[in-house]
Image (cartoon, grey):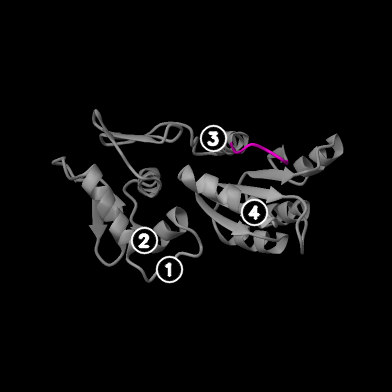
Amino acid sequence: MRVLVVEDEKKVANFIQRGLEGEGFTVDVAYDGESGVELGSKNNYDLILMDIMLPKMDGLAAIKALREKDVESPVLCLTAKDTVEDIVAGLDSGSDDYLTKPFAFAELLARVRALARRGTHERGAEITYADLRLDPVAHKVWRGDDEIDLTAKEYALLEFFMRNPETTLTRTMIAEHVWDYTFDSFTNIIDVYVNYLRKKVDRDFSKKLIHTVRGIGYVLKEE
């Protein structure tokens, strides 16, 4: 899952970013409302975390601007304001949930996962392809009866493949969904991680599932 965090307090933004990346999320960060709208409308995010008190453009105005641009990503408001009026204003602006500061990361993570499960893809549901099985809630993967031990980045990469089976995924598409906007597209890190994944998913099985599309990218398919 790819998440945008819009938060001007850098310590808070870094805290959220490190925590979510530790859970396997890909995280971009913007430190003001205008940058949040720019990133949110340019990229496809599974979830946006939006602080309310932001420079250049406040969070409520940023959410309205995103909705006017037909951005449908779920939005979780983060703010120190907790009156009924503030909560109603946040929800009326187009947000989906509201979390007051200070908060425990465990609570934030629970809200993030709950909002993600509301999406059209039912992200909390188990995903299967051929004899591969992925549990997005427990972050576990099996091939047949064998559980496969993956790093957070390998897991994110495989989840992207399994949500887009039999579709050729370019390196740009993979970079945008599994890495973040600062990713250096001139490195070979994607190829390196695909090779790591192949060793764990395909090496001990006669039927290979991850295939190279020469000059374009990769595809998850049965042959």
**Outermost left residue:** 206
Q: Residue at x 29, y 60 (%)?
A: 191
Q: Which mark is residue 184?
A: 1
Say which amino acid is labelled 4: Lys
Asked if the residue under mark 4 is in contact with the one under mark 1, i.e. CB atoms within 8 Å, the reply is no
- Gap between marks 3 and 2 measured at Cα: 26 Å
Q: Residue pushed farthest front?
A: 11
Mark 3 Cα-neighbour bin, 10 Å: few <14, some 14–19, many ≥20: some
What amino acid is labelled 1 in the image? Asp
Q: Earlier in the sequence, mark 1 or mark 3?
A: 3
Depth check: 31 or 44 in front?
31
Residue 153 is situated, as x and y percent measured from the top left of the image, at: 39, 49
Q: Main secondary structure of the magenta part?
A: loop
- Residue that carries the numbered disc 3 in the rendered image: 117
Q: Which residue bears the numbered disc 4?
A: 11
Residue at mark 2? 170
Foreground mark, 2 or 4? 4
Spatial separation of the CA atoms under disc 1 and disc 3: 31 Å
The crowding category of the residue bearing disc 1, from other C-alpha atoms within 10 Å (few below 14, some 14 to 19, many at least 20), is few
- Helix, strand or loop for disc 4: helix
Mark 2 vs mark 1: which is more N-terminal?
A: 2
Q: Residue at x 31, y 64 (%)?
A: 216
Q: Please state the extent of the stretch shown in magenta in the rendering.
A: 101-105
Q: Residue 151 location in percent, x, y?
A: 36, 45
How far is disc 2 from disc 4 in space, using C-alphas?
A: 34 Å
Q: Earlier in the sequence, mark 1 or mark 4?
A: 4
Q: Is 60 drawn above or below residue 129 in the view shown?
A: below
Q: Horizontal placement of 150 versus 51: left or right?
A: left
Q: Is residue 30 visible?
A: yes
Name the residue rendered at 53%, 49% in the picture: 18
Badge 3 element:
helix
